[in-house]
Image (cartoon, rainbow, N blue to C red):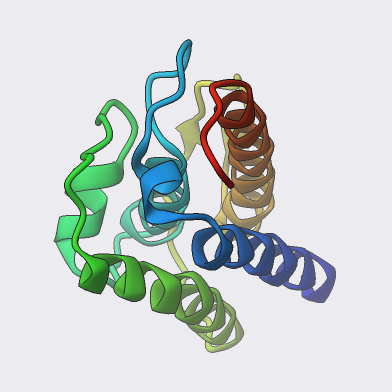
Amino acid sequence: MNYHFANHRQVRKNLLYILQNTSEKDLLTIPDGFNNNIYWNIAHCIATQQLLCYYLSGNQFRIDKYWVETYKKGTFANVDVKQSEMEDLAYLLIETSKILMKDFDNDFFPDYTPYSTSFGIDLKNIQDAIIFNNMHESIHYGYILAQKRALIGEGLSL
């Protein structure tokens, strides 16, 4: 699993770079043809990790429930995000990755409720969830890159 955790840390570093190096205006703008903004996609990764790894294993979230409720699948972007929330998201990107690895190493996930994802992938245990979560976050990273290109096309600065 070390390989999968290393991949997770790298995807999170990529997301953090975008969060910290994209203007607030561009983070919160929903480009034409998209349903959500860059900021929502980053926060959605945090929410989904908590649902896939903690909720389905019968554990409490390791973050405030606000993040899960606000950014889970089926929610929509809030374009009025405070700077303090952006700072919290930057912190959560790195810390939730560290916490997940520590919890995994401490056998914090002995139980897991099987789940079939909207991708048609069946998750049977925490290992499956971690591997799928990496794929999920990578897809959103790609989506974010497409949003950045769309914003350039709309004449917004990045």
> Residue 76 vs residue 46: left or right?
left
Q: Quadrant of residue 29?
A: top left
Task: Specify the quadrant of the image occupied by residue 72.
Answer: top left
In this picture, is 53 found above or below 44? below
Q: Quadrant of the N terminus?
A: bottom right
Q: Residue at x 38, y 19 (%)?
A: 35
**Position above or below: 150 against 101:** above
What residue is shown at x 38% (from left), y 54% (from top)? 24
* Residue 65 place in picture, x, y as percent: 17, 60
Left or right of 115 in this view: 51: left
Residue 12 appears in the rendering: yes
| Residue 112 place in picture, x, y as percent | 44, 54
Residue at 41% x, 79% y: name it. 91
Asked if residue 60 shows in the view, the reply is no
Pick whichever, 146 or 71, lies toward us. Answer: 146
Q: Residue at x 37, y 67 (%)?
A: 89
Residue placed furthest toward the top? 33
Foreground pick, 69 / 106: 69
Q: Nearer the viewer, residue 149 or 124?
A: 149
Q: Percent position (x, y) of residue 117? A: 51, 28
> What is the total number of numbered labels drawn onto the structure image?
0
Instruction: State whether residue 158 is above or below residue 1.
Output: above
| 59 shown above or below 23 | below
